[in-house]
Amino acid sequence: MKEFQCPSCRQPVLFEHVACANCGTPLVFDASCIDMRKLGLNQACRNREIIGCNWCVEAVDWYCRSCSLTRTTPDLGSTRNIMLWRRMEEAKRRLLYDLRRLQLPLVSRSGARVAFDILSDEANPILTGHLAGVITLNLAEADDVEREARRVAFREPYRTLLGHFRHEIGHFYWDLLVNGTAFQAPFRLIFGDETQDYQAAISSYYGRTDRSYDPRGFISEYATSHPWEDWAETFAHFLHIVATLDSLAGLPLSLDERARQTLTDPYFESDFEALLALWMPLSRGINELNRSLGMSDAYPFDISPAVKGKLHLVHMAISAFRDQRKLAA
């Protein structure tokens, strides 16, 4: 996340701020220009009061670009659900920031628009997943205690709310960036044949008694379940990398000229090796900082040569898509 400044006093403000902590100026995030602005007349999203949405509306809309994508909201009859929904929407806004910076559309080739169903499992079990552009998320994932319990139960080294959003949107972008394109053949070469029965593969994955896997070939255990899940996991990690490097750009660090060039806009860096050259020492440093504070590693993964190749394919597919759109414009 790039560093933002208050338009009134020029002091740093965070992406989630609804007002400047220094001068009190009410703020809105303008997704069209990716910047913080002073809240103007009729610019507040209808969800500003209830969940603290700080994105501005456009034209005569009631909701901002982010909130308008939420097709279904959870039961708001309890304070807990409102609090968890607030966390959900905060994570979604960060995801949409990533996609805006990458210049990736929220509409499929067929015209289907990305939408989000955020549901509570108080009455029926809710499975987080993706289908034809609709992303369903279980509200319970916004509960830190519940999410940690699930992380332990599934023996995962990492499970975050933002990670869920980045993973599920990866399925949508497989259809847009890979399916039926020149990248489908190389995808099958390094990720595997996606035409294998998905439901059977997932059932087999959850039915395994031996949960060991070769980390040299996959970024996570769940990535071993099916090539589509391997892609979604890898896509999410690519977003982790460029988003964190974007945050690095605002820190007072001494960097060489090539590193500064990369940090000008990590989302648009054309040299994949330059991204990894910065990411590898940074991820180690973040982990060491966490350990110094008595916390678990922030990024408990190793990027093997095989995983590096998969990340590179994600990078190439995104770059090629952007280039094609420029030529078509």
Image (cartoon, rainbow, N blue to C red):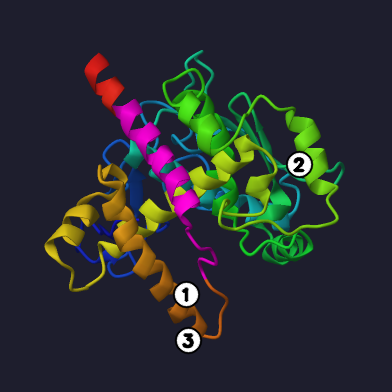
Q: Amino acid under label 2?
A: Leu
The CA span between labels 2 and 3 is 36 Å
- Counting residues from the N terminus, which is met first, the one under dot 1 or under dot 2? 2
For badge 1, the amino acid type reads: Asn
Give the residues drawn in magenta, as a range.
298-322
Q: Are marks 1 and 2 in contact (CB under 8 Å)?
A: no
Q: Where residue 291 sits: x, y (%)? A: 51, 82
Task: Determine the image quadrant of residue 125.
Answer: top right
Q: Which mark is residue 292?
A: 3
Report the residue marked by disc 2: 127
Indicate whether 48 appears above or below 293. above
Left or right: residue 197 versus residue 116 is: right
Q: Secondary structure at mark 3?
A: helix
Taking the image as drawn, is residue 13 in sight? no
The residue nearer to you, when weighing 30 against 18, is 30
Question: Within 10 angstroms of label 2, few (less than 14), some, or many (20 or more) residues?
Answer: few
Position of residue 61 measured from the top left corner of the image (x, y, whole percent)? 44, 28
Q: Is residue 320 above or below residue 292?
A: above
- Residue on which disc 1 sits: 287
Q: Main secondary structure of the magenta part?
A: helix
